[in-house]
Amino acid sequence: MAPNSTTFDSVSPTVPPPESKRYKYEIVWIKVIFFAYLHVGAVYGLYLLVTEAKWPTWLWWFALLWISSQGTGAGAHRLWCHRTYKAKLPLRILLAFYQTITFQKDIYDWCRDHRIHHKYSDTDSDPHNASRGFFYSHIGWLLIKKQEEVTSKGKKLDLSDLEADPVVMFQRKYYWYLAPVIAFLMPAAVPWYFWNERFEVSWYVCNMFRYFLTLHATCLVNSAAHIFGTRPYDKNILPTQNLFVSLISNGEGFHNYHHAFPWDYKAAELGSYFGNWSTAFIDLMAKIGWAYDLKSVSATMVAKRAMRAGDGSWKFDTRNEKAVWGWDDKNMDKSDIKMAEVTYRTSSPKMAPNSTTFDSVSPTVPSPETKRSKIEIVWKKVIFFAYLHIGAIYGLYLLVTEAKWATWLWWYVIMLVSTQGTGAGVHRLWCHRTYKAKLPLRILLAFYQTITFQKDIYDWCRDHRVHHKYSDTDSDPHNASRGFFYSHMGWLMCKKQEEVTSKGKKLDLSDLEADPVVMFQRKYYWYLAPVIAFLMPATVPWYFWNERFEVSWYVCNMLRYFLTLHGTCLVNSAAHIFGTRPYDKNILPTQNLWVSYITNGEGFHNYHHAFPWDYKAAELGSYYGNWSTAFIDLMAKIGWAYDLKSVSAKMVAKRALRTGDGSWKFDTANDKAVWGWDDKNMDENDIKMAEVTYRGESKSG
Ligand SMILES: [Zn+2]
Ligand SMILES: [Zn+2]
Ligand SMILES: [Zn+2]
Ligand SMILES: [Zn+2]
């Protein structure tokens, strides 16, 4: 079921702000007199209870209090108003009986008012708007004519579920016959009839004093639990966590939680019944089969909400809270230390993350069944790649049998700078804009990228942005759902698909067009590429250390190009097919360490598609399998790179919890696998947080 939004967002703009209008209160004097009598009577009741009441009267008085709070908490509030669980007829009759004892309006009226309270919380449409102060929200609102804004909102609410419940409608229809008998006559008559209590004692103890207590308990939820306490789940709303109110109301004081998750039958995060007997009652009813469909919020969802909107007071384990005074405190969590981002950052960049899930797929993309452009093979490219592969094998042979050591070195350097040109350059700088680079670095990276001979920067970025926006659909240039070969190399030997071209034309590439380095490279690409990508790499060994030109050509061009090309291609194929999906299980890209080694850091691809604006293109803090990050960090140190964007650990955690496949770990490098319960490596927090039902031994801690 969809949780109600209970933040100020849900306030209708037609509600006038407090400044524009003075409140008119029409005091209902009959209610004032009734409540005055109640309070005087309650004091007298307390006096009689202490001085005169028999012990069965004490017991009866307490039983009435108890079942009254169940009628409100488990009944009107959690069952009928919020529909947090379902109840069979006998339980509904029982709870309606209990609720009638409370004399707090009939169930239907109570639920309507309370639903308004949740939807328009602490605005003028809220029956007990706590922003008008303690007295108004506590009991003042009960002494006046209902405000017009409240009445009009109430009429717009859907109450059809209540109208469909015969128990609710029966109670409503006969309320003014039922209430006097059940709420006042019965409680006072029982002690008088069964154990000869004086009727006056019975009346003031079991009615006036009892009603006084249950009424104020409910009222404190509206006043104190909207004013005093912490807001661990949502700091943007007034409701608070208030243990005192919970103890008095048997579980309705965890009110910040309740407004954040009004559909949780526990009305609290707690697993225990401490201060929450209404939850115990519902669980008992569930065990005997009278209650069912108990809705509860998952720990993950609570964690997400608390991290996103809480005031910071939320803890997994509130009872074993280990406060830390700061860095180096011995209690500091080891994971926290590892997760901390400590850099030389001067300013924290703000940028909107690109959405890269399937949500961003335009509905105009035809589904595979309806239409698919035909694959047209471009034979010229097939012949080129055939020559490349034969040449690469020959290059490997020459490298091993004949090449000088200087040629080995040169071959390796060319490969290294090529991967920087792709990884740090065209991919992380120009395509994803994960950091900014000064002119010398841009020229250097454009030079490196030209060596790779993988299209000019502009073309590369357009294709790759299409790939991210329409990942693994027919609009993706290397759609991995067409299989390994197509996504790896097949797409390079075909005419570009119409779906891809049309999406590419719609992309905003103005940032690339504004970069003179990119446009210069594009303009002169077919002059630059032959010289930089092939002539230069082959000439250097021949000219400087008299390598045979044939060796130089096949090693430093064919073999080298073969390797860097397949490195890039593996990101599109293997890293979309083989591996885990810790950050988003709904997309094809995977974490593939092997691909990361080959590409110097582009194989953490599930992460990269989830957070394409992270300059590390990975969660790792280390450079392990990610030399492109080391290169960017080095450039940042000499001042050529700046504004390095990186995802916060919290954001990573949130995403992994929400959409990951479960393989995500805080600390992937030092992953401590656990075989099961009682493993010595098991996290202490995990043990404390574990939900253990039907415990055989007493709880520790
Ligand atoms: Zn509520
Ligand atoms: Zn409230
Ligand atoms: Zn990318
Ligand atoms: Zn990809």
Image (cartoon, rainbow, N blue to C red):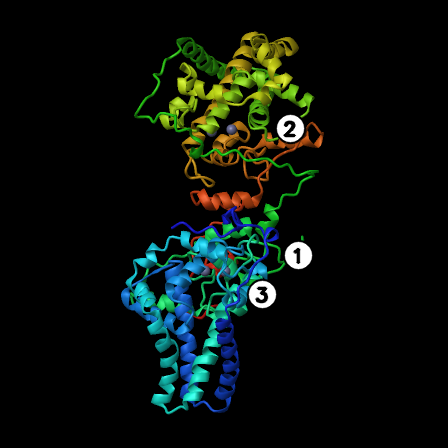
User: Identity of the amino acid at label 1?
Assistant: Asp
Quarter of the image where one finds residue 477 = top left
Q: Residue at x 30, y 26 (%)?
A: 369
Q: Nearer the viewer, residue 432 or 365?
A: 365
Depth check, mark 1 against mark 2: the one in front is 2
Quarter of the image where one finds residue 283 = bottom left
Find out whether the residues at labels 1 and 2 contact each other: C-beta distance under 8 Å: no
Find out whether the residues at labels 3 and 2 contact each other: C-beta distance under 8 Å: no
User: Identity of the amino acid at label 3?
Assistant: Phe
Q: Earlier in the sequence, mark 1 or mark 3?
A: 3
Residue 402 in percent (x, y) is at 54, 14
Counting labels gives: 3
Residue 154 in percent (x, y) is at 43, 55
Q: CA distance from mark 1 to mark 3?
A: 41 Å
Q: Secondary structure at mark 2?
A: strand
Q: Which residue is mark 2?
A: 436
Horizontal placement of 622 versus 276: left or right?
right
Depth check, mark 3 against mark 2: the one in front is 3
Q: Which residue is mark 3?
A: 134
Rendered image: mark on residue 329:
1
Residue 16 in percent (x, y) is at 55, 50
Q: Secondary structure at mark 1?
A: loop
Q: Earlier in the sequence, mark 1 or mark 2?
A: 1
Quarter of the image where one finds residue 155 = bottom left
Q: Nearer the viewer, residue 652 or 634?
A: 652
Q: Nearer the viewer, residue 466 or 321?
A: 466
181 over 654 or under it: above or below? below
Find out whether the residues at labels 1 and 3 contact each other: C-beta distance under 8 Å: no
105 over 187 or under it: above or below? above
